[in-house]
Image (spheres, rainbow, N blue to C red):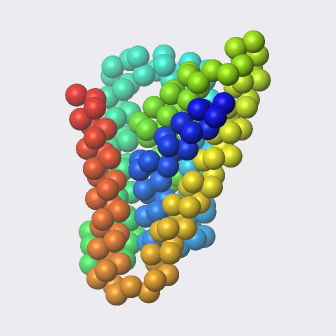
Amino acid sequence: MLEFCLAVFFLVITPGPGVLSTAGVGSGFGYRPGLAYVGGLFVGNNLVAVLVISGVAAVALALPWLRGVLLFASTAYLLYLAGKIAFAGAEIGFIHAERPPGFWNGLALQPINPKAYVVSTTLFSGFGFLPEAPGTELAIKLLIFNILWIPIHLIWLWAGVTLRRLDLAPQVQRTINFAMAGAMLIVVGLALVSQL
């Protein structure tokens, strides 16, 4: 079980669309929108876990055309979020952030987030520790997964909000927002390359 806990920690804390966008929302918009966004990510992440555990994701992702549609949707949505974060503190930009990303944006991200499927598949199909009671093992895994997932995302949110509270010069804040958006774009690029 210790191996499972370590795997959860390292798979969830490493930069991916969820944690990077959480830090970006915190940096660009603050705690309240950030907490709503994390709430949506949480619900969406558990939805993805259920899809993986039930086998629905495996069946659906076996269809090449559906994988292509999901890849396109995830890329487009991550580009949208990256733009929203990049221009959150900018006076001039082609995306004007009237409303910060919230619960529904977080929820919408996870079902099209390739990393969410990889993490759930890795964790729930491996690291067995109760072969005689697979239902109990699954329940324990879900509990541990969520117990670790929540504080990790709150730490990323705190990091983003802390950057916001440093009262940095507007140009520095814009640079940080662009860097966070750029990191998300790198993740998008890696996801696209891995599909080729």
x 33%, y 85%: residue? 170
Relative vertical location of residue 26 with respect to residue 122 in this rendering, above or below: below
Q: Is residue 102 visible?
A: no
Question: Quick one: 30 or 155, which is closer to the camera?
Answer: 155
Q: Quadrant of the N terminus?
A: top right
Q: Is residue 72 left or right of residue 152?
A: left
Q: How many marks?
A: 0
Whether residue 166 is situated above or below residue 45 in the rendered picture = below
Residue 142 image position (x, y, % from top left): 68, 34
Locate residue 54, reporting x and y percent: 61, 21
Position of residue 67 in the picture relative to residue 125 (left or right):
left
Q: Residue at x 57, y 54 (%)?
A: 152
Q: Position of residue 18 (x, y in %)?
A: 47, 50
Q: Quadrant of residue 194?
A: top left
Vertical position of residue 157 compared to residue 56: above or below: below
Image location (x, y in percent) of residue 187: 32, 47
| Residue at point 51%, 26% (across, down) | 121
Indicate left or right for 171 with 5 as reference.
left
Q: Nearer the viewer, residue 9 or 16?
A: 9
- The quarter of the image holding the C terminus is top left
Q: Is residue 42 above or below residue 124?
A: below
Residue at the farthest front position: 2
Query: Which quadrant holds residue 86?
Result: bottom left
Identify the residue at horizontal 46%, vertical 63% (top origin). 23
Residue 8 vs residue 87, the one in the foreground: 8
Residue positioned most to the top:
132
Residue 133 visible, this orientation: yes
